[in-house]
Image: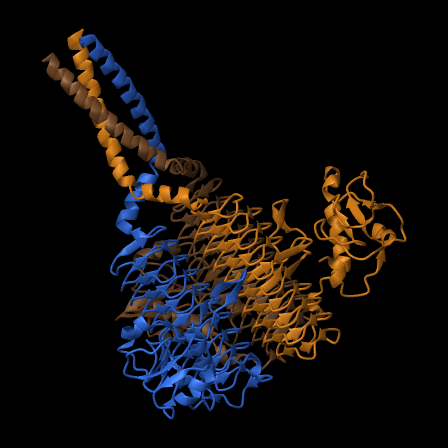
Chain colours: A orange, B blue, C brown
Amino acid sequence: MSTSEIAIQGTSITLGEIATLVGGQLIGDPGQVCLGAGVPDEAAAGEITMIDHAKRADSISNCLASAVITPEKVDIARSQIVVSDVHEAFATVIKHFRPLSSTAMPASGVDATAVIASTAFVHPTAVIGPHVTIGERTCIMPGAVVMPGATIGEDCVLHASVTIYEHTRIEDRVIIHAGSVIGANGFGYRFDNGRHVPTSQLGFVAIESDVEIGAAVTIDRGTYGSTRIGQGTKIDNQVMIAHNCQIGKHNLICSQVGIAGSCKTGDYVILAGQVGLKDHVTLGDRAIVGAQAGVMDNLEGDNVYLGSPATTQREQMQIMAVERRLPEMRRELKRLRKEVTDLQQEVDTADRRAA
Amino acid sequence: MSTSEIAIQGTSITLGEIATLVGGQLIGDPGQVCLGAGVPDEAAAGEITMIDHAKRADSISNCLASAVITPEKVDIARSQIVVSDVHEAFATVIKHFRPLSSTAMPASGVDATAVIASTAFVHPTAVIGPHVTIGERTCIMPGAVVMPGATIGEDCVLHASVTIYEHTRIEDRVIIHAGSVIGANGFGYRFDNGRHVPTSQLGFVAIESDVEIGAAVTIDRGTYGSTRIGQGTKIDNQVMIAHNCQIGKHNLICSQVGIAGSCKTGDYVILAGQVGLKDHVTLGDRAIVGAQAGVMDNLEGDNVYLGSPATTQREQMQIMAVERRLPEMRRELKRLRKEVTDLQQEVDTADRRAA
Amino acid sequence: MSTSEIAIQGTSITLGEIATLVGGQLIGDPGQVCLGAGVPDEAAAGEITMIDHAKRADSISNCLASAVITPEKVDIARSQIVVSDVHEAFATVIKHFRPLSSTAMPASGVDATAVIASTAFVHPTAVIGPHVTIGERTCIMPGAVVMPGATIGEDCVLHASVTIYEHTRIEDRVIIHAGSVIGANGFGYRFDNGRHVPTSQLGFVAIESDVEIGAAVTIDRGTYGSTRIGQGTKIDNQVMIAHNCQIGKHNLICSQVGIAGSCKTGDYVILAGQVGLKDHVTLGDRAIVGAQAGVMDNLEGDNVYLGSPATTQREQMQIMAVERRLPEMRRELKRLRKEVTDLQQEVDTADRRAA
């Protein structure tokens, strides 16, 4: 998914207009229409993406985007807009396609521009923002809030007081229990002159079909693109999933798990209660992580991991078995020390006698 | 408590009608009226319960239920309905007595069938579903949602945006702080053909008198019967209590504790911050578990436990003391290795000389 | 900040009237007007404070308060009110200045006594209690609830379903994401006759300027005075900060961190995900605590800490390195034992031969 699918207003813009908007130099046709903006992995044909270093030009060879924002002219068979600050320029373009407008919510009920399927149920105390779409038979319970540009598929249930931030995209048969918050800003700051200054948090959350999300869960939006929850994944209460994470299909994520930014999990991964994942960690298909473990590095699939830092169950069980014998080991070490020292004396004495 | 106490509509049904409803074979009087359905520990006289294996017939000898759903004819002095799938049949019966109807909420305010005591305060932005009862002097704050069939006693306070799911039963003088979610579905799935399929989550949460619950707490309903919080227990913010747990009286459960499914705690248990309990663990009266501990096995009462996996404080303190000396122990081990090897050479040399 | 700044009704009272109210003996001018009540660190000139033991008289020598509630006559150059139960008396005085009145909320929208800046946006489904003030350009999203006597500065955003309890004081440019709960009661109980009885939770939360708070965060009010979040501090989702904590300026507190009561952090402290702090712990400026660590004691600033119980990164890395070699160490220890025993025999035999 990229911005074009969820653009919420008359956002038609040409590359020439974008170049003017971001104060960049266009290499390409100024009249070419741009349909949206997305990170390299997510941008569609007709859209614009970005690379923040010229040496990354190769990395987008498979990207579908028709134009690229670059920090300098690169050798690449697409339109380019060269700018001095790629991140600032890309943020500006994303804001054009996905404007953030917290105060745009209707006074109550459903905004006039929202499209609600005829068989959907929206409780009158829920608030549905502009340009939201809600599919057939979906049920929005009391006090739920759906902010501008979000899309919700068919047969979903948003329970009481769920908050869906702007541009969240939810597919079919998704259930979200009470109090969960989908799409809040990621926790990203840069340090500038003694202060933590927020970085851009312009992405969105994408929740695929048949996902179930417990109560009081928080899933943050991506930086520019998606935080994604794969099809059929089940998430228990009080789980936290940070910005840019790409959670695979049919995962089971138990209560109070915390997943830091930009982690990826394969399919059929299981994370037991209170597990923590460091940022940018990747877990292979069918990896299983035991309760309270702390994952600090990538873990291969088809294995069970325990401990903090997490290692294989096999290794961890050995370590744990020894840990319980540590006091005994220490006493044995002291006994050995004494015996060896005694032996040394004895041998020295024998040596002297023999000499 | 069983379903009969909280049946929310004309649910009178005979055993004959139940047999027809579930496609089972009745052994007993088809005209016998059934008043409700409950798990063996909770079913009352006049109600129906179930056993999912014939060999469990003995285990319900003290159960008060008047009828039993069984997988085959068993030798038992009660009415029986024999079915091919006990869980499916029992789920059908529970849904008869405790129907789930998310969209049954009134447009706003209090449903016409709810019974609100004259001295209770219900804020106009709260939403109170059908067949709810609210006792004298109880205060329901803005944005709180109470779903169908829940009962709330006297002198309770539900703070802002609290969600009470269907059939929750709250006794007197219970305080629940803002954002807490009581009675969401348990996290139970069976794996079928590559997908996680939700299992029945048809039970309820029972909160006894004088319980206090902090902010953003989640307590899930039982599978068929109760998740229970015992009288006088105090629960801090962001605690998670999973389905079927039976928490004792006068417990203190500190912030961010996570208790997996079907755990039991005795009376006067204390769980410090961020403790985790594995599912099906039982803690004895007055057990104390230190911060961040991970309880993997049953723990006896009247003792203090630390660590993950949690063991007695005494044992854990010894282990921790040694752990801090591990680098020193490793060096000592290396020194001993060298000295023993040297000694061996020395003794060998002496032996050779002596020979 | 002290109560006088946020007194929400005609609360003018003299020391003589206070003495009568609490049944105490006044040593001082009964006509002296008292402007508020605060703990020693926070009370302003013209206000009353308390000491719960005569020997603490010295500790308030720098306190600005004009009067003191004391358990006995002490030698101190201020007005005194001597009472038998200092805590009960002080609680009574605080309740006079900061009355708690949960049911005082308006039926919907903004209470007539609230003062809302002309450029502020309050969504019609939000509920704003009596004597609340909201500054210019502040945005209150759907379903947010602001309870009596709270003050919110300029350019703030309270997202959907945020709850702000009574007397919370929020400065400028503060952002609070959906579902967070600010100012609920602290988790404080005394054990009396087999029951946990709540202690006074009469304080408030003070959030300084430029603080950002994620989704589903809980920050509890102080016992009598403040729980304070320092200027520029950023707090991620699902963080818990308990009563009386004093968080410094420009901290970064990552997701699912739990900070127990009365902790203090310096400036520029960083707490990684799932860290826990024991109550009454103090962290120095620029202390950094790694993910999942458990802080049991005060930690000096300008250092990095890991583990549970947390020690310096340097020490912890050494311990962790050895822990992974524990099974190998145990085997080596067994080998050494055998070799030493063999050596002893050999030496004994040699000795006997030599003898």
Q: Could one spot residue A89 in this view of the protein?
A: no
In-image side of B19 versus A29 (left or right): left
In-image side of B187 versus A109 (left or right): left
What residue is rendered at 41% in x and 41% in y?
Answer: A315
Q: Quarter of the image holding residue C317?
A: top left
Quadrant position of the N terminus of chain A in the picture: bottom right
The residue most toward the top is A355
Residue B19 in the image, given as x and y percentages of width and height: 42, 85
In-front residue for pair C95/B107: B107
In-image side of B5 versus B162 (left or right): left
Residue A146 in the image, given as x and y percentages of width and height: 65, 70
The residue most toward the bottom is B31
What residue is rendered at 24% in x and 60% in y?
Answer: B302
In-front residue for pair C299/A332: A332
In-front residue for pair B53/C28: B53
Q: Could one spot residue C313 in this view of the protein?
A: yes
Residue C248 vertical position relative to residue B252 in the rendered view, above or below? above
Residue C345 in the image, given as x and y percentages of width and height: 17, 23
Number of callouts? 0
Residue C7 in the image, given as x and y percentages of width and height: 51, 71
What residue is rendered at 48% in x and 51% in y?
Answer: A288
Quadrant position of the C terminus of chain A in the picture: top left
